[in-house]
Image (cartoon, helix red, strand yellow):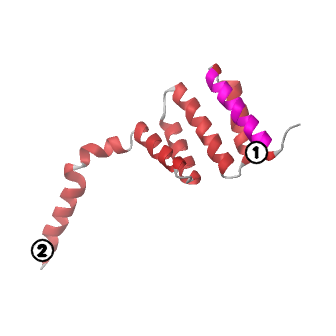
């Protein structure tokens, strides 16, 4: 009976760490983290999507990608009713981002938030 348990443990460890080990690093790649976050966002699971976008932002070295991730993070905060936090992120991003297309997207998102939340001064 003890040999059976030993073989079972060895088999399980081989399965866990063996054949699939090459794909584990890919599973945690920036691209896959973002893909999973996008999926969560599409299914309206905003809190887990927020965490995944934050995780991708932490690991990202690409400034354009960081800008897009920041927009997604702000969007998640807005959908989680953390409106002031979303607005702060969007407004801070406007000062840091030079890309006009991304700035237009941020201004559009801010306009939507202000209209929906009736925070127009």
Q: Position of residue 80 (x, y in %)?
A: 66, 52
Query: Which structural element holds mark 2?
Result: helix
Q: Which residues are magenta?
A: 101-115
Q: Position of residue 109 (x, y in %)?
A: 69, 36
In the rendered image of this protein, does residue 27 appear above or below residue 100? below
Q: Position of residue 87 (x, y in %)?
A: 73, 39
Q: Position of residue 59 (x, y in %)?
A: 48, 37
Which mark, by number, is residue 84?
1
Left or right of 17? Residue 100 is right
Left or right of 121? Residue 29 is left
Q: CA distance from mark 2 to mark 1?
A: 59 Å
Asked which quadrant contains residue 99, the reply is top right
**Which comes before the other along the chain, label 2 or label 1?**
2
In the rendered image of this protein, does residue 32 appear above or below residue 65? below
Q: How many marks?
A: 2
Q: Residue at x 71, y 52 (%)?
A: 81
Which mark, by number, is residue 4?
2
Instruction: Check residue 81 for magenta coloring.
Output: no
On the question of residue 98 being in view, the answer is no
Residue in front for this viewpoint, 78 or 8: 78
Q: Residue at x 73, y 36 (%)?
A: 110
In the rendered image of this protein, does residue 116 appear above or below residue 1? above
Single out the mark in the foreground, 2 or 1.
Answer: 1
Which mark, by number, is residue 60?
none
Q: Residue at x 20, y 57 (%)?
A: 15
The N terminus lies in quadrant: bottom left
Query: Which structural element holds mark 1?
Result: helix
On the question of residue 54 being in view, the answer is yes
Left or right of 77? Residue 116 is right
Disc 1 residue crowd, few under 14, some 14–19, many 20+, Cα 10 Å: few
């Amino acid at each position: 009976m003890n040999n059976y348990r030993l073989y079972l443990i060895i088999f399980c460890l081989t399965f866990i760490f063996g054949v699939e080990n090459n794909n584990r690093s890919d599973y945690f790649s920036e691209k896959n983290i973002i893909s999973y976050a996008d999926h969560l966002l599409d299914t309206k699971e905003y809190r887990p999507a927020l965490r995944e976008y934050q995780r991708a932002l932490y690991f990202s070295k690409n400034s354009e990608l960081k800008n897009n991730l920041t927009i997604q993070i702000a969007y998640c905060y807005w959908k989680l009713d953390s409106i002031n936090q979303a607005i702060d992120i969007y407004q801070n991003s406007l000062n840091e981002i030079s890309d006009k297309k991304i700035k237009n997207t941020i201004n559009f998102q801010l306009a939507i938030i202000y209209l929906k939340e009736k925070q127009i001064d």
